[in-house]
Amino acid sequence: MMGNLALGPRRAMTLGTAIALCAGLDACKAPPESRYVSDPADARHGLEVIERVGCGACHEIPGVGWPEGNAGPSLRGFDDFGPIAGQLPNTPTNLAAFVRNAPLAKPGSPMPAMPLSVAEARDVAAYLHGLDDG
Amino acid sequence: MVEAGSAFDAWWGWPPPVLDPAGPYADSVTTLAWVLFGLGVIVTLIVVAAVYLAVNGSKRTKSKLGGERAVWIGGIAFPGIVLTILLVWGLALTASLTKTPTGDEMRVRVTGHMWWFDVEYLDSAGNVVLRDSNELHLPVGEPVVIELASADVIHSFWVPNLSGKEDMIPGRVNELLVQADKAGRFGGICAEYCGGPHALMGFVTVAHGSSEWREWWKDRTRSLPGIADQDVPGETVVLASNPATPPDLNPLDGRQLFMNSGCAACHRVAGTEANGLAGPDLTHVGNRLSLGAGILPNNRGTMMGWIGNSQSIKPGNRMPNYDMLSADELEAIAIWLEQQK
C-alpha cells in the first residue's frame, strides 16, 4: 500500500507540469469577481423597492427573508446568470427595463409589468447585480 | 431581513408599529404601557441597589437591610401603596376602552377565519350593507364599533395604532371601539395563535378625512340598490400603477378562467355567478391595498404569484396552488381581478 502513495518519477513530472501551469495561469488576469459592481446606496434603495412591490411573491431573492415565492425562478446569484429570461443580455440597462415592464422588454414573458418608476427599476437592477459584490 | 420603519411599512400599513398611537383608545393603552415600564425600571434599580448593599455595604447598612423594619417598609408598605395608586389610576385611564357604545357609532362586523378577516359594514339595523376582506375603511375622528366574531378558532383583533387587542371567540360577539384621529394606513394583525400561518394573518385599516371618506363610501356603494347619492364617483385609494404598462395583449378571458378554474367555489364577486363564501370576498379586490390578508402589496405580479403558488408565500393557507395554470392564464385572471373595484 505504501508504494502506491509514493510518487513515481513519471507522476512527479505530471505534478510538476501542473504546478507550472497553475503558476502560468496566475500570471494571467483573473476573471472579474463580479460582472457589474453596483453603487451600494442604489442597491440599498433597490432592496427597499423590491420589498415594497413584493418581488418575493414569486422569486427567492437573497436579502429578502420573506416571502420566497416559487411561482418564478430563484434570483440567487443573479450576476452570474446568462441572458435574462433566456434572451436579453444580462446588462444593467436590460435588467432595469425587464423588471419594470417584462412583456415589453421580452414579448411573451411570463412576468407581468411591475409598478416601478424608471429610477426604481434601475435600483432594483443594481441590487440584483450587486448581490455578489463586496 | 425585512426592516421595520421606512417607506416599506408605510406603503400598505403592514407590519404595524406598536407604541405609536393614532387615536384616543390606543393612546391610553400606550400611556399605561410606558408608565408601567418606567415604574418597573425604578423598582428594578431599587432592588439591584439593595442587593448590592446587602453584599458590599457596611455592617450597619446590612443589619438595617435585614431588619424587620425594612421588610415592613420595602416589602409591604411600598408595593401596597404603589400598586394601589397604579390600579386606581390605570382603571380610570382605560375606562374609555370598556365604555358602552352609545348606539350612534358606525358599526362593522369583523369575523376571523383561518387565516384572514371578513369585513362587513352594517347599517343601524344591523344589516350588512357592504362586504370586503382584510381591509377596513373608517372616517377620521369618529369612534367605530367593531363587532368581533370568529368562524372557527379563537383569533384576536389588533390594530396597535388604533386600540388595544380583543379576542374573536367562536359563538359570541365582542365589541371593540376604535378611533383614528389622523388619516393614514394602519396595519393590524391576529394577536392570538390560531394555527399554521397565524403570523401571516394581517389586516389593513385606512382612515379617511371626512370628505374623502364620503367619496369612498359613495364609490363603494354606487352599485348597491337603495343607497342614495350614487352620482359622486369617489377615488381615494390609488393603487400602484405602472405608467408604462402596455395595453393588455393578453387575449384570454380572465373572467371565464376565474369561473371555470374553481376560484368561484370559494370566492364571491358580487354581480357575477361567483358566490363562494369559504374564502375572502373579491368584489372590491382591485381596490384593495394588500393581498394574502394584509401581507403582500396588491399588484399584478403579486396577484399572479399568489394565485399560482400561494403555499410558498403563506404556507398552510387554505388556497391551493394553481400551478396548473399557465403564466398567460394567471395574468388573464389577475387582469380581470384588477378590474373588480
Image: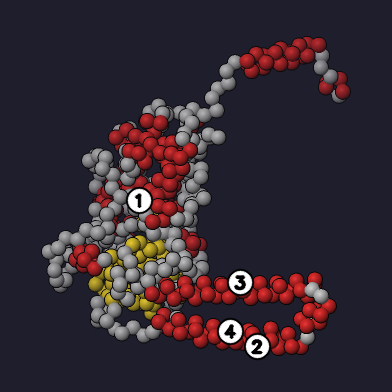
Q: Position of residue B134 (x, y in %)?
A: 36, 64
| Label whose residue precedes the other's in the sequence (3 or 4) | 3
| Label whose residue precedes the other's in the sequence (3 or 1) | 3
Q: Which amino acid type is marked by label 3?
A: Val
Task: Tell which subunit mark 4 falls on.
Answer: B
Quarter of the figure with residue B138: bottom left
For residue B83, the mark is 4
Disc 3 target residue: B41
Disc 2 target residue: B77
Image quadrant holding the C terminus of chain A, namely: top right
Q: Which amino acid type is marked by label 1?
A: Met
Q: CA distance from mark 4 to mark 2?
A: 10 Å
Disc 1 target residue: B303
Instruction: Describe the element under mark 2 as helix, strand or loop.
Output: helix
The total number of labels drawn is 4
Task: Tell which subunit mark 2 falls on.
Answer: B
Q: CA distance from mark 1 to mark 4?
A: 52 Å
Instruction: Describe the element under mark 3 as helix, strand or loop.
Output: helix
* Relative depth, front residue between B161 and B14: B161
1 vs 4, front mark: 4
Crowding near the residue tagged with mark 2, few <14, some 14–19, many ≥20 C-alpha atoms within 10 Å: few
Is residue A22 something one can see in this rendering? yes
